[in-house]
Image (cartoon, rainbow, N blue to C red):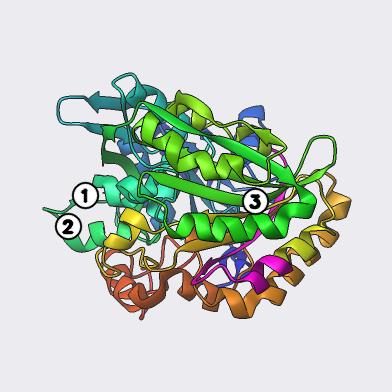
């Protein structure tokens, strides 16, 4: 389903009496156009997204979610669900319809004895890490600390601990959900098993996830940071990175990147996180730190919670974003040469190209064990175009599309759902779910046959049931 199809809604003006009844049923607040709070709530991380819901329910608890879902169904309203609002496609907000805003749901509880953490859907990764790290614990989370836990986990959840501990979705023990008929369920390995399977990679297609319980692991001081190399060594850097990651232990996750310094100098770079013995990590990372030699070596021991903020300055809210991404079966010289050639002409200095290395614990989960199934692809490559001036949008979008068209034969047809932009089309959405797509349709038929939750990378029910 394209963005145009998702947003193609016609909606009769709501009766004021209905709106008043909805507002009276809430413990949180009901935001309407024309207020400062509404304007703030409708803004998401990607400034390209400028949509205006008819109503925003800023939830104070699960009961507010239930009331909002019932109201949406009774009035046949388009539904968008906002957790962290970080998704590049901007699916957290709709034109018309109703936004169910979970951003105020911030409860977090760590059980250090059981090594688990329970967090509400409005929590961001920096907040979760802060609480878990107080006990020397952590779990796989996003590379930018302002990313919401909900969207990242539901889409799979890549992060720097993934090679040692698996994806975010691999560490989920249970998820609380309000389904399309307004019923509250808990999905886990022991109950609503089909839903639990689908939520771990199938995105927001099956309901409103209101809380997550994760398995935690001992994570204290890690060895990590950036190593920067001259631009004219970019080809050598990628070749080194390809060989370096081929023998990497599970404790090491490394990304290769093409970036531009604040002074406007193009650079190549490798980011590394070694989550294990610092002494062993020093030996493992020595070839990385000696290659080049580097222009700057910023690797040092640091708390995991601090390492997780490394990329925050590169992804502030309010920038215009457009991304293209794919999983790679191999990191070929042809593909990296295309990236280097394209990046030399990138229209924005804020843009980057990043290659992430998967494998390890990620690849030891079966492709059918969770809805996220791209387990055997060892790399993910992303062109993340960011810019400030809206008049430069066409140039940046065109550049990104041309780069991806050029390397498409090398990237294949597998893509990470969390990196999809809003105009990718149905074939790319299917590629995000891969061989698990038909099984996901079956779960969609069970929990959302009317496609109430379609403001996402949509899995269409095989037969949509008409409301009424």
125 vs 338, nearest the viewer: 338
Tell me the crowding category of disc 1: few under 14, some 14 to 19, or many 20 or more residues within 10 angstroms, Cα based: some
Q: Which label was assigned to residue 154?
A: none
Q: Residue at x 88, y 52 (%)?
A: 391
Q: Which label was assigned to residue 185?
A: 1
214 vs 453, nearest the viewer: 214
State whether residue 381 appears in this view: yes
Please provide the residue range marked out in magenta: 317-338
Residue 104 appears left or right of 297: left
Query: Nearer the N terminus, badge 1 or badge 3?
Result: 1
Q: Residue at x 33, y 73 (%)?
A: 436
Residue 425 appears left or right of 466: right
Q: Report x, y in % for residue 106.
A: 39, 28
Q: Report x, y in % for residue 172.
A: 27, 46
Residue, disc 3? 257
Q: Nearer the viewer, mark 1 or mark 3?
A: 3
Q: Residue at x 35, y 80 (%)?
A: 463
Residue, disc 2? 192
């Amino acid at each position: 389903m394209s963005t145009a199809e998702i947003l193609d809604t016609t909606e009769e003006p709501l009766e004021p009496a209905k709106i008043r009844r909805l507002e009276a049923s809430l413990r949180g607040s009901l935001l309407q156009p024309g207020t400062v709070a509404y304007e703030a709530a409708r803004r998401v991380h990607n400034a390209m997204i400028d949509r205006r819901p008819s109503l925003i329910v800023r939830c104070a608890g699960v009961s507010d979610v239930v009331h909002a879902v019932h109201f949406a169904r009774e009035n046949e309203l388009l539904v968008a669900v906002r957790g962290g609002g970080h998704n590049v496609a901007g699916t957290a907000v709709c034109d018309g319809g109703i936004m169910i805003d979970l951003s105020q749901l911030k409860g977090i509880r760590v059980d250090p004895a059981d090594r688990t953490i329970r967090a509400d859907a409005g929590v961001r990764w920096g907040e979760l890490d802060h609480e878990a790290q107080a006990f020397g614990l952590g779990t796989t989370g996003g590379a930018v600390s302002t990313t919401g836990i909900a969207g990242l986990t539901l889409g799979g959840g890549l992060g720097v601990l993934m090679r040692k501990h698996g994806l975010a979705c691999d560490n989920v023990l249970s998820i609380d959900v309000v389904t399309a008929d307004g019923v509250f369920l808990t999905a886990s390995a022991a109950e609503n098993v089909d839903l639990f399977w689908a939520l771990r990679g199938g995105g927001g297609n099956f309901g409103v996830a209101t809380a997550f319980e994760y398995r935690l692991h001992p994570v204290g001081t890690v060895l990590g940071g950036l190593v920067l190399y001259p631009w004219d060594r970019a080809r050598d850097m990628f070749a080194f990175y390809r060989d370096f990651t081929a023998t990497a232990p599970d404790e090491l996750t490394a990304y290769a990147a093409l970036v531009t310094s604040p002074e406007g100098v193009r650079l190549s770079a490798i980011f590394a996180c070694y989550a294990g013995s610092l002494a062993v990590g020093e030996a493992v990372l020595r070839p990385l730190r000696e290659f080049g030699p580097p222009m700057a070596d910023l690797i040092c021991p640091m708390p995991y919670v601090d390492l997780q903020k490394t990329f925050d300055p590169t992804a502030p809210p309010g920038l215009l974003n457009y991304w293209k991404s794919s999983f790679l079966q191999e990191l070929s010289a042809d593909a990296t040469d295309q990236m280097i050639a394209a990046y030399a002409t990138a229209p924005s200095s804020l843009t980057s190209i990043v290659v992430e290395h998967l494998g390890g614990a990620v690849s030891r989960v079966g492709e059918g064990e969770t809805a996220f199934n791209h387990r055997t692809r060892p790399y993910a490559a992303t062109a993340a175009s960011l810019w400030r001036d809206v008049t430069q949008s066409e140039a940046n979008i065109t550049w990104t599309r041309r780069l991806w068209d050029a390397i498409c034969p090398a990237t294949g047809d597998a893509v990470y759902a969390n990196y999809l932009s809003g105009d990718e089309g149905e074939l790319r959405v299917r590629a995000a779910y891969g061989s698990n797509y038909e099984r996901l349709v079956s779960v969609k038929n069970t929990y959302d046959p009317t496609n109430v939750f379609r403001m996402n990378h949509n899995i269409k029910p095989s037969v949509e049931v008409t409301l009424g």
